[in-house]
Amino acid sequence: MKKLFLPTVGLILLSANLALAADKVPLKTELPNVVILGTPVPIDVPNLEPKQKDWPEFMVPAGTVNLAKGKKVTASDSDPVVGTLDLITDGDKAGDEGSWVELGKGKQWVQIDLTQSATISAVVVWHFHSQERVYRDVVVQVSDDPTFAKDVTTIYDNSASGKDRPYIETYLGKLIDAKGVKGRYVRLYSNGNTTNHMNHYIEVEVFGKPAA
């Protein structure tokens, strides 16, 4: 019986894995044009990730969509220096003026309300890509609590206490693996950048499916 049972279990597991693999598709998004403006500013940040050259191959469940498109955005700075918060989820990823919002100095956050709890596969963020720079203390969290006082899951953290590495901004944005975390609200932190002390966002996409 054992000789028959073990191969059968192996076949079942193999079939299940193949079915899961077949339900996966590459994550795709529309990338903005490359725009380089202004004089480059030296970047002196240790432990930088290698500069991204191509859109990464990242598999997500079939039927995954950008749940953030057109959704309401709030922020720690309710009166941005430049632009309006709705620019963050309007689908415009261009790097020129009029496509981004600028928040004040120091640690700031923006928060997207997906309107219902969702299973999130990935978050993609474009802070500013018309000049190479590094945004400091980038943290991305997910929760069902709008105040982020409880039940918070951190999916990315390149601050001094985090495990992720800082990266150079490009037109490719930053794709963050959310590992299927569930939550209604997505909050993103930053703390200035290597060019100035301000915080910027062009677009944030949240790819997933409404939670069952």
Image (tube, rainbow, N blue to C red):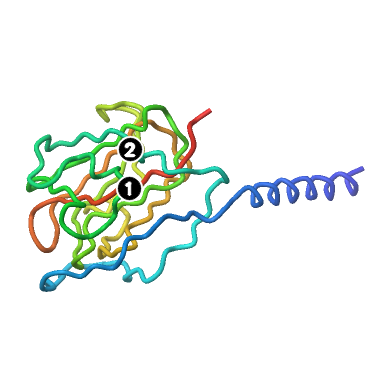
Q: Position of residue 17 (x, y in %)?
A: 68, 49
In this picture, residue 105 sits left or right of residue 57: left
Q: Which residue is mark 2?
A: 70
Q: Position of residue 11 (x, y in %)?
A: 80, 49
In this picture, residue 189 sits left or right of residue 209: left
Q: Which mark is residue 43?
A: none
Query: Judging from the image, what secondary structure is the residue with disc 2 in?
Result: loop
Q: For residue 46, what is the image quadrant?
A: bottom left
140 vs 201, nearest the viewer: 201
Q: Which residue is mark 1?
A: 91
160 vs 119, nearest the viewer: 119
Kind of residue indicated by mark 2: Gly
Q: Are marks 2 and 1 in contact (CB under 8 Å)?
A: yes
Q: For residue 171, what is the image quadrant?
A: bottom left
Q: Determine the residue positioned at 64% across, 52% down.
A: 21
Q: Determine the residue positioned at 14% across, 58% down.
A: 193
